[in-house]
Image (tube, rainbow, N blue to C red):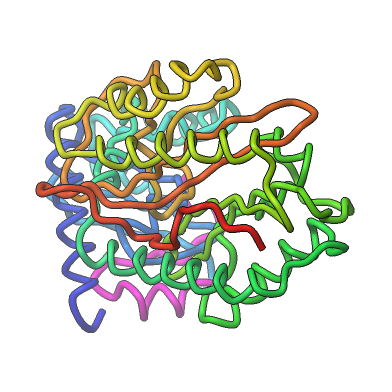
Amino acid sequence: MVGGMGDLHVARRRRLGALIAEQDADAALITRLVNVRYLTGLASSNAALLVLADGTARLATDGRYAGTAARVCPDVELLVERAVALRLTALAAEGGMRRLAIEAHDVTVEHFAELVAVDQGMGLPPLGRAVEELRMVKDEAEIDLLRRACEITDRAFAEVLGTVRPGMTEREVAVALERRMVDLGADGIAFESIVAAGPNGAIPHHSPGSRELRAGDLVTMDFGALYGGYHADMTRTVALGSAAAWQREIYELVRRAQQAGVDAALAGAETKAVDAAARDMISDAGYAEAFPHGLGHGVGLEIHEAPLLGSDKAGRLMDRVPITSEPGVYLAGRGGVRIEDTLVVRADGPEPLTTTAKELLVI
């Protein structure tokens, strides 16, 4: 690979190799496609990677992706094979390896039986989520891609917001946001967009439908751009025409709680404590039951990845970890508010990646 990404992939494989050695394994079989992409740069629907404890690797993919693999990761030995995981397992066994760690959280019971049938007595211990743990702390190249995804997301919102009006359906607003993100350079959408108007705003993961927007509605829009494989995530809630006193009350509460979550996202902070910074504010206002989900999650090659921020989630934030802060208040039959930003934890304080203003907009 030309440029620095190839070097980054080599460094990632070496870090994984060190973890493999710590587990007293000779190699690891990487079958999660997102993890194969992280370690090689290859996006494929059928690929697996054999990573040895010294960091060297062999990649298997089928003929549909052979040309792409040769171009994207020429530094990795390539096997063109349909049964990718079985071929690499047989290769490890033929090479006299004693223990081949596998991604047990990805391998089905049926697939495991197939691997055992070719492993020639080689042990297949679980690798655990070692690659996911490596992925949690991003390098600056990854953060640049994520930053661009967020810039597209911010701009799409700004440009579509002026077109939103009563009579449009939730789905029409969602499609407008998605189309604009692609027009602005996104590879696609990061996830299925949420547009929830009026009472539907009380459903955190509402699927946008045929309900028409009406004057007096709160409208929640949760969406993001996909760029270079990296996922942006932003939510804004606006008022259509006017905002009632109760709407302004819960909006301001969520806005303050969301900012408290952002401010608490410091390197070294416990994930529970970051969640509590926002959750306690909402609970103290009497809306504890109206905030039923965690404060946020990591983002990167997947829209939801480690770390998770919740009242029951253990762990600590580290430098260069992108996360979201997305508290909400949801009132059944009336509506709701959620505000969300993607940000990067930095040693000197959080860096916001989505930067759209968070004051209540009445449009």
Residue shown at the point (42%, 65%) measured from the top left: 150
Q: How many marks?
A: 0
- Quadrant where the image shows the N terminus: bottom left
In depth, the one of 286 and 295 nearer the eye is 286
Residue shown at the point (80%, 59%) measured from the top left: 171
Across and down, in percent, residue 130 comes to 28, 36
Across and down, in percent, residue 276 comes to 34, 22
Residue 84 magenta: yes
Q: Is residue 124 visible?
A: no
- In the image, is residue 199 above or below residue 50? above
Residue shown at the point (16%, 46%) measured from the top left: 319
- Quadrant where the image shows the C terminus: bottom right
In depth, the one of 356 and 5 nearer the eye is 356
Across and down, in percent, residue 346 comes to 17, 49
Across and down, in percent, residue 193 comes to 65, 55
In depth, the one of 153 and 314 nearer the eye is 153
Q: Quadrant of residue 181?
A: bottom right
In depth, the one of 48 and 269 nearer the eye is 269
Residue shown at the point (55%, 40%) measured from the top left: 251
Residue 50 magenta: no
* The residue positioned farthest toward the front in the image shown: 245
Q: Is residue 257 visible?
A: yes
Which stretch is magenta?
65-87
